[in-house]
Structure formats: structure tokens, C-alpha cells
Image (spheres, grey):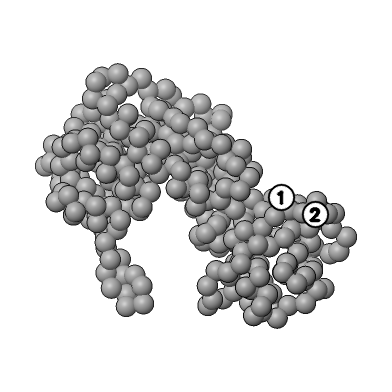
Amino acid sequence: MGTPEFAVPSLRILIQHQYPIVAVATAPDKPRGRGRQLSPTPVKDVALLHQLPVLQPESLKDPGFAEQIRSLHPELIVVVAFRILPREVFTIPPLGSFNLHASLLPKYRGAAPVNWAIINGEKETGITTFFLQERVDTGSLLLQERIPIHDDDDAETIHDTLAPMGAELVLRTVQLIEQGKARPIIQVESLASPARKILKEDCVLHWDTPAYSIRNRIRGLSPSPGAFTLHHGKVLKIFRSRVLDEKASIDPGTVRVLPNALHVAAADFILAIDELQQEAKRRMTIEEFLRGYRISSGEKFT
């Protein structure tokens, strides 16, 4: 069970190792692009390529969905970036149901673990498999792998590192369960932290906060949904920046324009903007941006 690109390597690795997949569950097709034509999910694309039956329930709480799963007699359910399964579904397989989560549980339980780990300035993150329980991301831990978060990482680079790592962890977890060697460990509740869904207000940059906090927010939201600021009421999304070794001596949000650079004052240091995007335009380097955008030193981002 999975939907986005993140779940594709996990499906592929189980296919490659010839596990008998009785069905793949994914989200319904959605209209995409300018023509708003219905498009399948990345997971559905792979399932159809390998001629696997595909289930696309509108509601996971529909009794008909649980009945569909029951009729397949699955031994195990593997969940990667799907929706919250009701108890009536995840308790069907005799070997249980497990989920792959992109954090070091119990830290960062929720919908956006990669984003919040970077926004909060964490120096490491990872991937976890765990048995499903009714409360989201609270089940007993199976396996974990850690990776460092480097200074130049953003949500995209961490996502692209964790997806194939997660597939390997899924395979190892299936093998352990299959062999009867899984040794689940109960999560320590006192170590838990949330990673709720990213909201629009989380993407707003506040220049009266420390420069490194601003940069972490930019990294944690890059490339999507994108951190943004306003200039004359228009949205500027910022994707890459650097903190300069220069104390800010001007008001937070005040800009300084150089021939090939754009600097912004934070609460403590100066931030250099390297990549950004104005409304209805493509993402561009600061050099490209300054060639076609009117902005002067002393103006303010809000």
C-alpha cells in the first residue's frame, strides 16, 4: 500500500525478490497538468507495468475495502507513504501490517518528518519500519537506519536518499518476519515528537528570527511546498540560501542588492539568497533573477 514516488522503490524491490504480491493499494487517479487529465499514482504505474491487481479505494473506512483485502487472504501488509489504515484492515493479515516511516521513530511522528527534521536543525535522520497500531506512528519498532543531515541537504536530497534506503529496509523487514526472527521494540513515549502536515503559514519566512533558523526553514521546505517572503505584496519563493559571516546592522528583512547577489538581514546575521522563484515564473539563480527583476537596496521583504 503506497502512493507517491517515495513508495516506488519499496514495491520494486519486493517484485525483484519475487514476493507474491496479491494486490497493490494506492490513491485514486487525480487530474493533473494543464489538461486536468486523470493520472495514475507513481505506485499504480509500477503495479500495472508488472500486471499486479490495483485497488484504489476512495475511503479506507468503507467496509467494502476491508472485505476486498480479506478476500485476498494476505499474509502481510506493507505500507509506504499511504493513508491511515483502520484497525479493520491492518489486523487482517496473520503476520501483521508494517509501515515504513521517514524518521527515527519515536521522533517526528506524522505526515512531514523529513521537512520538520530539517526545519528544526537536526543533524541526523533516518528510516524506520514498525508494526501498525491504531495511533499513528506509535507501533513497535522493527528496524532503523540512520543518515546524517549535511549542511547543504534539503528536503529533496534527504527524500532521494531515504527512498532507496527504505526499500532495502522494507526487504529486510519482510525477510525477518518471514523467518520468524522479528523482535519488535516498544517505542519510548517520552522521546516522541510531532511532524504534522506542512501548512501555508509554516512556509512564511520571518526575517526577525535568527539567520540559521531561516535557512533551515528554506532547506526543509525546498523544493516543495517552498518557503516564501513578500516583496511589494508579491510572493517570492526561496529555495537556496547561505548565512554570511556578517552581523546584521540593518532592520530584519532589509535587502542589499549587489551586481550578482541579493543579501537580506535576519535578526542576527546576513543571509545570501542563491535560488528563488517569483510568481508565475520558473525557479532561477540569483544572477538570472536580478537581470529581470526590479529591486533596490534598502527595500524590505515582509
Q: Residue at x 73, y 53 (%)?
A: 243
Q: Is residue 87 above or below residue 144?
A: below
Q: Is residue 159 visible?
A: yes
Q: Is residue 256 above or below residue 174?
A: below
Kindly report the distance in space between the C-alpha atoms of the residues bearing marks 2 and 1.
Answer: 8 Å
Q: Residue at x 80, y 51 (%)?
A: 245
Name the mark on residue 89: none
Name the mark on residue 269: 2
Residue at the disc numbered 1: 212
Q: Nearer the viewer, residue 153 or 26?
A: 153
Q: Looking at the picture, how far across and down is residue 107, in whole percent? A: 53, 36
Outermost right residue: 249
Q: Nearer the viewer, residue 89 or 216?
A: 216
Q: Are marks 2 and 1 in contact (CB under 8 Å)?
A: yes
Amino acid carrying label 2: it is Phe
Q: Residue at x 85, y 54 (%)?
A: 247
Q: Is residue 189 above or below residue 206?
A: above
Circle 2 Cα neighbour tier, 10 Å, few/some/many (<14 / 14–19 / ≥20)? many
Q: Is residue 130 above or below residue 214?
A: above
**Along the horizontal axis of the image, is 251 left or right of 203?**
right
| Numbered disc 1: secondary structure | helix
| Numbered disc 2: secondary structure | strand
**Quadrant of the rendering where the C terminus is positioned:** bottom right
Circle 1 Cα neighbour tier, 10 Å, few/some/many (<14 / 14–19 / ≥20)? many
Amino acid carrying label 1: it is Tyr
**Along the horizontal axis of the image, is 192 left or right of 131?**
right
Q: Looking at the picture, how far across and down is residue 10, in whole percent? A: 31, 42
Quarter of the figure with residue 184:
top left
**Along the horizontal axis of the image, is 108 left or right of 68?**
right
